[in-house]
Amino acid sequence: MKQIFLFFSVISVGFILSCEKNITVSPPAYNNKVSITGFIEPDSIPVVYFNRTVPYFDKAVKKNELMIRNALITINSNGNTDKLSLDSVFDKVDCQFDYFYKGHNKILANTKYDLTIISEGKTYTANAVTNLFAPAIDSVSYVSNYNDLYGEHEGVVTYFKDVPNQVNYYRYEMIRSADTSIMKAEAPIKRACLGKDTVTVHEIGRSVFEDVGKEGKQITIIVEPAYSHRKGTKGRIFIQSIDKNAYEFFSQLDRQKLAQFNPFVEPVFLQEGQFGSKAIGFFAAKRNSNPKTFVYPE
Amino acid sequence: MQLKQLICLVIMVPSLAWAQKSTISGYVKDAGSKEALIGASVMIPSLKTGTSTNQYGYFTITVRNSDTISIVVSYSGYQPSLKQIMSRSDIQLDILLQPALNTLNEVVVNASRNQDNVNKAQMGVIDIPIKAIKDLPVLLGERDILKTIQLLPGVQAGQEGTSGFYVRGGNLDQNLIQMDEATVYNPNHLFGLFSTFNVNAINSVKLIKGGFPSEYGGRLSSILDIKMKEGNKTKFQTEGGIGLISANLTFQGPLQKNKSSFIISGRRSYIDQLLKQASKTTAYRFYDFNAKVNYELGEKDHVFASFFRGNDDAAYTGANSLNYGTNFGNTTATLRWNHLYGNKIFSNTSLIYNDYHLQLGTSQNNYYQVLYTGIKDINAKTDFTATSGSNHTIKFGANYIYHTLYPGAMSAKIAKTGKKVVINPDSLTKRLSNEGALYINDDYQVSSRFSVNYGLRVPFFSAGTKTYSFIEPRVTTRLSINDQTSIKASYTQMNQFMHLVPSSTASLPADIWLSSSLKIKPQTSKQVALGLFKNFKENEIETSVEVYYKTMNNQVLFKEGTQILLNTNLDDILTFGKGKSFGVEFFAKKNFGRLSGWASYTLSKSTQQFPELNFGNSFPASFDRGNNLSLVASYNLTKTWTLSADFVYYTGRPYTLPAGKVLVNGDGSLYDNYYSDYTSRNNSRFSAYNRLDFSVSNKKQVKLFKKFAYEREWSFGLYNVYNRANPYFVYLTTDPATKQPQAKQVSLLPIVPSVSFNFKF
């Protein structure tokens, strides 16, 4: 009787337990593209990131392998041309250099800028207008438990006034310092690069917001912190006003990431943006609000 | 105007003259149980004419008056019957067939062997003998109708192990599965590994995948028409079986000998008791119950009442932190009244109720989804079959269904507390709708070589203020080249008002039924098919080649990136497009002899195109499998031992992989430093699916304690003989150390041995 039971149990367990293995998939054909991302903001020096994309299953590559050198990048406005130069800064959190093209002249308000990139025989163009108004943050607070599309999480709450009489798009940013005791998402910051130093980090909200139905009214944004914190950790919070091109781009990225995390959501394809099918990315204007100091209460 | 014409046709047709002709009509039944034999062949070889019994075993045939004619009646698994009658007046003739006792030495005359596949103006229709279903190798000892369906040409299996099927490029919801005319919305047991139909309670199974007669409608791709047994009218009979995970018992007998009978059949799993010992995270329980009574009120009236209920309750934990909990069930009840007007018009009037619910909670990768689908239908229908002259068989009727749907869904990240939202079905908004149809169909034998089956169906649907109505022309023609060869062509239009919205990404079923509305337009299809049908060796071997081309509009999928919340209006998160499928199907079937079985090969392509998906470009449907090969064989080794095997090979189904990745500059923490570049939908395929199953069974009459005689059968099987790890789903992950993207494949069923014991007395 015992043997019969054992036989039945083995059969049953064998049947219900699925097996899992790593497989080699034939990667879909992919023609490498370029990615272009650049924000311009009044009173700031323009910065444009210009990289190549890689097939999805390629081994992880360093930023210096992805950045495209020898590109001719110019920003024109009212007959003035600013030729951007290749520059870099060491990212102590990511433990590698960040490469970008940087201009020489400060961006002016209420001006149209044309971006032109010439690289390897191809030309990429886009434009942006720096006519955004800075929103005003009313107050900030903290909530230890909040439920939204991204699940249950703690959140930094920002209350700000919508700029009236125009369609606006917003994004959250917090600037704070971090050290190796801080977790970025779920991984510790690399000790080798940071040592005992602290570093200034920018926490950018993944979600972007449109002021539909909130015209001229107070808007509330609740954002899950990307870095761990302790009671008393300080940060400066900004609300970025971004233009439609940036909004549409980041909105797609947000939904795509949600679909990647959540197996019950259909994958999101990035639609053609300002550069058409030639390149992924955006060239957009933004305007930061006044900063508001925030202290984590726990 | 068109409706008026239709009504006129219906009224005029029965009044056509039958001068100098007589009608032979009656029932064909099993001689022992008096069970109706559905689809039995009734032939008059001298006149080169014939017909088949309908869904109630009734036939009617009109012939010119003559002195004596011979009628040959045959049915698979039975000895043919030859009757000689004088046809000078109308004759009521009930014919009883004796089961074939010795299948090893079966002698069947040519004319008696059913050659409907060649002679009838029907295409894409396959009658599946219950015997074939019983002979096939089975998973865990559970005989399964739907697993057999998956082995037919033009039919594609769904995911590994599931009993869902796709017909000629249509989605799962495009199959209308009916049990005694009641719709069964979810025909699954055990995560879809078995169907909910208990083979011992089934009389007949018919699959229609093209050339639909007008009496059928409401789905685009197929009709699976299942009829329950009526019950033995002459003696009490008990039949049962014990498998690895469940046991079943069927009891039938007369209520009033030769007039009335009943059948009760039940199946209950006991895997839950075993799993309690083996796994704390997996639990499973299912049951199904069938009951039917019938009463012959006289020669012209027959009433039936049937009931079916199936229910599943399951929880499962698997790979990739996949969790799955569900409770679902179907309940159907059917009241039917058969009436004969004279002996030329047969009518069936039915009142049908069905109640379906599915409560499903799935979690994977720290996200979960809960959904609830409830459907209640009240259905009334009446159908008439009239013979006119010797050449026309006219069917007409009407149908009305009142649908109540209450769907709801929610998906979110699992809270740190583990708490999940629970959907209360009572709080869901009900979607009420009315669906109806009128139809007329004529099976017209123009000459011995040429016949045409044509008709019209006029469906209509209303939900709120929105009403849809259509006219669906249907036509199938048959041109015989010789007695054993014919060419057929068909054209059909179909409409569908109930939609199961599929999720292309979820690893487990996460589908929601919705009815048409202002925003959700009915699905429509047009299908043309052409076929060559040829029988060999006095109909011992049937062969066919069919090509088809089908277009479908208003196909439904979820929009990209939509996470469903409880307050989401489901109509707003759908996107609509069109589909196209074409292919060629080869089928060869050996009906008789020690070796029987079939080979089926389908080469097809199914694509979809949605303006809002895949940059508006066409893409392979998620159930597209280019090559489908099925080989099925059963060999009677001796009078008691039977060997069976089946082999399947399918092209792997497509899924979507990102093609490129893009670096995130600045702070990329929220994007894991990269985001994805998708270039086309369903751009990759699982590895090909192939599997060999084998079984051996021993069946004989034995005596218990040398007195009590009964029939018993031992069946031993191996599912997936060479233990191939066929893909169930593939998911992507990133190696935390190397940041290298990886693909992981989850397989479900390894080699699975089984043993079952069946008995009958």
Image (cartoon, coloured by chain):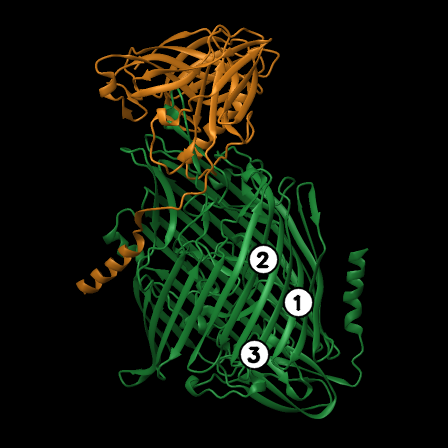
Mark carried by residue A167: none
Which is more toward the observer, B630 or B27? Answer: B630
Q: Amino acid at mark 1?
A: Ala
In the image, the chain rendered in green is: B
Q: Residue at (54%, 49%) from the top-left corner?
A: B375
Tag 2, which chain? B
Instruction: Using the numbered discs, state the Cα–Cα distance from disc 3 to disc 2 in whole angstroms.
Output: 25 Å
Q: Amino acid at mark 3?
A: Asn
Q: In the rendered picture, chain A carries what hue?
A: orange
Name the residue tied to disc 2: B582
Asked whether the residues under the numbered discs 2 and 1 touch, taking CB atoms below 8 Å apart as contact, a structural biologist would say no
Name the residue tied to disc 1: B489
Which is more toward the observer, A37 or B220? Answer: A37
- Marks 2 and 1, the one that precedes in the sequence: 1
Mark carried by residue B535: 3
- Marks 3 and 1, the one that precedes in the sequence: 1
